[in-house]
Image (cartoon, grey):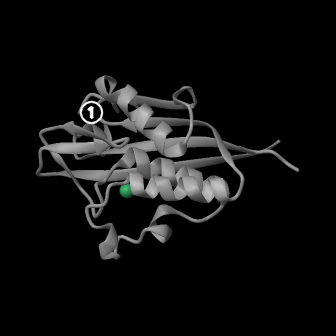
Amino acid sequence: MSHRIGHGYDVHAFCDGDHVTLGGVRIAHERGIDAHSDGDVVLHALCDALLGALALGDIGQHFPPTDARWKDCDSRVFLRHCAALLAERGWHVSNADITVLAEAPKIGPHREAMRAAIAQELGSEIERISVKATTTEKLGFVGRGEGLAAEAVVLIDRILR
Ligand code: MG
């Protein structure tokens, strides 16, 4: 068995709006997300972790924000693409561990829906997908409510023949 690890990090600023999308789940909120796509920091960090494990660059290379095709795009499209790159090369997700950094909205009520959405796109079991959350104790841009961030770590496996 061969193993690889990948890490991803993403940030988006809040703007006027009435919802955010996190982990493929639409969550009602008093602010929106300023982004070219749907601005899903969870899926963007996860995609970067998967691309990192494959040493295939980053999400900006695969889905340039200058490309009109990705305007307001559902980020599950990005994750599906990364999952296909993984599968083509014979890799499986052993586990993914994601941390959302946000003062609001509350992540807990949406955690299971995010895990299920991610597991579905990766063709993985929900037990392999972890979604955690923390505030930053009112410190920094997250603490001031200017935006939110996510970090992701993945381990991928491939059976050597
Ligand atoms: Mg992003």
Dividing the picture into quarters, in which one does residue 20 lie?
top left
Front one among 125 and 2: 125
Dividing the picture into quarters, in which one does residue 112 lie?
top left
Q: Residue at x 31, y 36 (%)?
A: 102
Q: Is residue 112 above or below residue 36?
A: above
| Residue 30 x %, y % | 12, 39
Q: Give left or right: position of 138 versus 100.
A: left
Q: Residue at x 69, y 49 (%)?
A: 91
Report crowding for label 1: few under 14, some 14 to 19, many 20 or more residues within 10 A (C-alpha): many
Question: Badge 1 is on which residue?
Answer: 103
Amino acid on which the number 1 mark rests in the picture: Glu
| Residue 126 x %, y % | 51, 29
Q: Residue at x 44, y 32 (%)?
A: 115
Residue located farthest toward the top when viewing the structure as drawn: 109
Front one among 95 and 7: 95
Q: Is residue 144 above or below residue 65?
A: above
| Residue 136 x %, y % | 35, 33
Front one among 80 and 11: 80
